[in-house]
Image (spheres, rainbow, N blue to C red):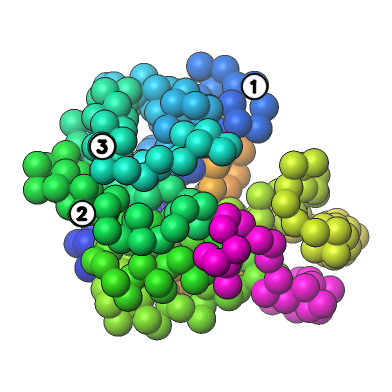
Amino acid sequence: MQYRPLGNTGLQVSVLSFGASSLGGVFHAVTREDCIKTVHTALDLGVNLIDVSPYYGLTKAESMLGESLKDVDRSRYIMATKVGRYGDREFDFSARRVIASVDESLNRMKCGYIDIIQCHDIEFVPLNIIINETLPALEALRRSGKVRFIGITGLPLKIFTTVAAQAKIDTILSYCRYTLFDTSLTSVIPQFQADGIGIMSAAPVAMGLLTDRGAPDWHPAPPIIRKTCARAAEFCRSRGADIAQLAISFAVAENRIATTIVGTANPENFRRNVTWAQSPVDGELLRGVQEILAPIRNQTWPSGLTENND
């Protein structure tokens, strides 16, 4: 496993990280045994960053991590969890709630402290709340020793640049913005690098768009993106390749992104993801896929408040 520095945090993170949303049964039913085995498989393969949230499975994912990690030395992993989002339409970034949320997460995961505490999907609320209330509350928690670093997460890139210009943050976690068809995250990387902000990216397969199975029914992408990604997946199949492998190897190859987060509750699937992450990009296949995806290049979908979208 390769490791990269996460901004100015001093942390060295594995280029592929474990996204624990699947442990909450977010996508399909999971077993306790598979969840525990998947977490241990990830650690044994050199993955050292785990990303979770109380939102995933409505606290189930965090509780499952607590069970999975109870006999694991704390120095073996970097724990990143979140505050502010607790249901599909339940957001509360008030100082009182986020302080309580950190204590609740620590109780569920029993990890002693949280390495990276992140404000979850901040595009759904006015950003002045994050800047003037949430982040100061998290800074107080940092001083108490409960958290080490502070970050923000979401889909629109505008939220990252807006908050970073007005407040101190250590990390950003972007999702679906560095994929085979949308690499717009690169437009803000130089700014974050200059400020020493660590860059994390999630969902390299664009929440299922860049897989043989295709996007789930709930996916917010418009039809043109769905159809174009499906054509790209078929192109890969016709050449005996899996578009998900290309997507993961492509994402990890961008060395300015500290880590790429992928999730599963299946140990063999995660083992395969690590193998893919360590495989070189097939240049010829990539050129063919990007030609198909050209009509939707850097396209996305709205998320959160209109004022917070790019």
Q: Is residue 133 above or below residue 40?
A: below
Residue 288 colored in magenta in the image: yes
Q: Name the disc covering residue 136, or none.
A: 2
Provide the major secondary structure of the magenta segment. Answer: helix
Q: Quadrant of the C terminus?
A: bottom right
Q: Label 1 crowding class (10 Å Cα cut-off): few <14, some 14-19, many 20+? A: few
Tag 3: amino acid: Arg
Q: Residue at x 26, y 43 (%)?
A: 95
Q: Position of residue 104 (x, y in %)?
A: 29, 26
Q: Residue at x 75, y 56 (%)?
A: 221
Contact flag, marks 1 and 2 (Cβ < 8 Å):
no
Q: Is residue 130 visible?
A: yes
Q: Label 2 crowding class (10 Å Cα cut-off): few <14, some 14-19, many 20+? A: some
Residue 15 colored in magenta in the image: no
Tag 1: amino acid: Ala
Q: Position of residue 9 (x, y in %)?
A: 22, 62
- How many numbered discs, if any? 3
For the residue pair 87 and 250, the one nearer the viewer reads as 87
